[in-house]
Amino acid sequence: MASVRPNPPDVLKRVFESAVMIVPGGYDEAGLEPGQDNLALPQALRYWRHQQNPPDLRDTLPAGEMHAYLFQHFLTGRFATPIPDAWMILTAAIATKLTLGLLGPPLPNRRRGLLALTGGTALYALASLQLFVSAWAIALPIVLPAVTVWIYAIPWLWSSRRR
């Protein structure tokens, strides 16, 4: 009778459930050179450390802790998918040109146009952040596509053509 081999994903799952990381960290001597294993603390992590009770006031991130976070994201399948800036800039440019072309001449009220532009930019930024923290974890660029829209829209708002 042939032996039954376990399914490879099941074997990996059992291995990863019992994985242990032994890493240096939390002291200046870690790494090949003093302090090499300690990284600058990202602002988001600094915020969360200060929210703990009592606050964690360390200002460095041991590389082992960073690897532990990456390993945990690997095990849970929680990775962010970044969308390239160039794609979103191109999309923003095309969408803005099409929108402005459909709108025709500028609105007589520039203030309303600026408010719409500001509101649209804020809405896009909030939607991008929500998409990032959602289950989809898609990271859309915010600044450069928004600047592209403004570069196309401001001259359109200030043009001398009126209805």
Image (cartoon, helix red, strand yellow):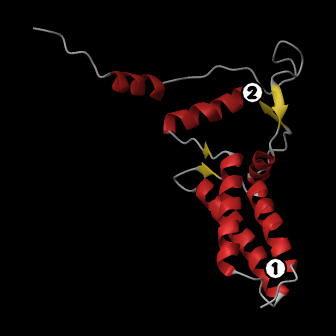
Q: Quadrant of residue 80?
A: top right
Disc with the residue nearer the chain's start (2 vs 1)? 2
Q: Secondary structure at mark 2?
A: helix
Q: Left or right: 18 with respect to 41?
A: left
7 vs 41: above or below: above
124 vs 106: above or below: above
- Label 2 Cα crowd, 10 Å radius (few <14 / some 14-19 / many 20+): many
- Residue at the (82%, 31%) spot, across then down: 39
Q: Secondary structure at mark 1?
A: helix
Q: Amino acid at mark 2?
A: Ala
Give how far apart the Cα atoms at labels 2 and 1 are. 46 Å
Which residue is nearer to you in this view: 151 or 65?
A: 151
Q: Which residue is mark 1?
A: 114
141 vs 73: above or below: below
Q: Amino acid at mark 1?
A: Leu
Which residue is nearer to you in this view: 118 or 149?
A: 149
Q: Which residue is mark 2?
A: 63
- Residue at the (82%, 90%) spot, across then down: 109
